[in-house]
Image: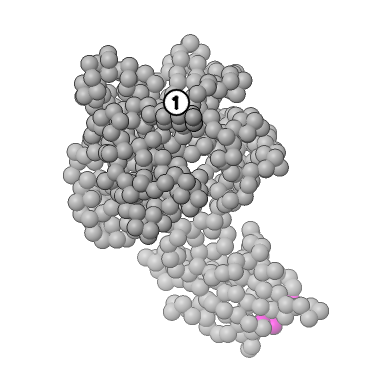
Amino acid sequence: MSAARPRPVPPERRLVVWCPDWPVVAARAAAGMPGVPGQAADAAAVFAANRVVACSPAARRSGIGPGMRRREAQARCPELAVFAEDTDTEARLFESVASAVEDLVVGVEVVRPGLVAVPVDRATAYFGGELPLAERLVDHVAARAGVECQVGVADGLFAATLAAYRGAFVGAGAGAEFLAPLPVTELNQPGAERSELVELLRRLGLRTLGAFAALAERDVLSRFGRAGLVAHRLARGRDERPPLRRTPPPELALTESFDPPLDRVDTAAFTARTLATRFHTGLASRGLACTRLGIYATTENGEELGRVWRCAEPLTADGVADRVRWQFEGWLRAASGRPTAGVDRLRLVPEELVAGRSLQLGLWPGGGSAEHTPESDRAARALVHVQGLLGPEGAVTAVLDGGRGPGERVRPVPWGERRTPAEGHDAPWPGRVPAPSPATVHDPRGPARVVTDDGTAVEITARNEVTGAPALVAVGDDPPRRVLGWSGPWVVQARWWAPEHTGVHARVQVVLEGRDDAVAAFLLRWDAECDPAWSVEGTYD
């Protein structure tokens, strides 16, 4: 007689509070614009990498939606208010919403700025049901935080989140039925990064969550791997991971005292990176990673502060640092409820753990799929130590950003901060020098002299053309060398509204005769306002 298979444990019933278009709400508040997108007639949108991240209802009525390019959005709505994505500001301002929810319900978990989740079993007994609790929350958040929100209730975080988007209350045990007709694109929630999986499912004809859930778990695992299996669990109305059955041991928590206390956001941000690295290293050494992070602080006056952050994926060291920094900004810059003294004690607690194999890291942040190794851990600790001695700018990595010249395109980013290109980095950038870039960029630039065969100095005309073909180039104090080949010019009109040639510069690539049959290649720059006009900006190896 075979033993009966254990029945799956149902997901915990959760209530999710969602603030629609939160990036727009936060951007408008930071800019001092009155009202919120749900009430104001003004069209507004938040952009990242020149694409819409979020937009107001007025913008949507003009045909603007997520993923649309900025130029197209502004063409559809010329009066569109444009904001750049700022996750730090979004997280800081969302603290007022999380605090308002916490006034009524304990166990608040910030899923991401704009979305919080709470367990409802005990709260519903106190408030007389799920609907009265939801009504109280909506009214209280509007009164205290000044923003509108929607509430959804269902079994499990994923179903409750989708219910909040629709203002729905899903009965116990009815999560799979609620999810079945929804499009499979709902799997691609912020932070989950399932766009490739969703696109593959659509190409296979699986266009609803119900169609995906109907597949056998074994087939899903063999075809889509672990990421597909997690998504399959969600589509079936289950939790992303099986319920946690044990409490993480207390030695995995990290406690730090500060003297003097932390009362400035910049100091707290720097400290957050150091603590995050230590916290993550301690977990990684035991083969673990954190998916729910508790951040608890005590002030000089004995005030107790605390918040739990839930994450779709296991937290990296950078992810821990981001959430600690966001939480400190929320506490120290809160319009109301701000602590009366600096923080003198901080405790990071892994509220939920998963196996560390779920997480793969590279040495450099955002560095692709390089595996997490002890060597990369030691390098990261060394860089954090350098920052401790020299300050945040003492250890930096490079980000390839927007710009026309090679020196303009490289932006140093302090170690531990997010390495994301600035808005507009992928713009056309007229006058940009084509690849390859010079191996060495000179700062300051050295002088050069460029002449034609008859010794006439080469210049750039108002029609963006050279006055003659470069024949000889003298670099610095070296004697002139013959030009074997050249290309350009790439002209930049830095101030097109100014008088002729004011603010104009151009670049030319040249290959020169070298010594001992070797050749040398340079990137030369011509500036209308400089003397000498020509200089060496880069050297090609």
As drawn, the residue found furthest toward the bottom would be 454
| Residue pointed to by mark 1 | 308
Q: Is residue 490 left or right of residue 450?
A: left
Relative image position of residue 119 (x, y in whole percent): 35, 23
- Look at 51% across and 13% down and name the residue there: 300
Relative image position of residue 174 (x, y in whole percent): 28, 33
As drawn, the residue found furthest toward the right would be 516
Q: Is residue 103 visible?
A: no
Q: Is residue 187 magenta?
A: no
Q: Amino acid at mark 1?
A: Val
Helix, strand or loop for disc 1: strand
**Is 327 rendered above or below residue 205?**
above
- Look at 39% across and 48% down and name the residue there: 215
Q: Is residue 424 left or right of residue 471?
A: left
Quadrant for the C terminus in the image: bottom right
Q: Is residue 492 visible?
A: yes
**SS majority, magenta:** strand
Q: How many numbered circles are shown?
A: 1
Taking depth in this image into account, of 498 and 487 the one nearest to the observer is: 487
Specify the segment rendered in magenta.
Answer: 479-483
Relative image position of residue 339 (x, y in whole percent): 43, 18
- Look at 67% across and 36% down and name the residue there: 381
Q: Is residue 112 left or right of residue 360?
A: left
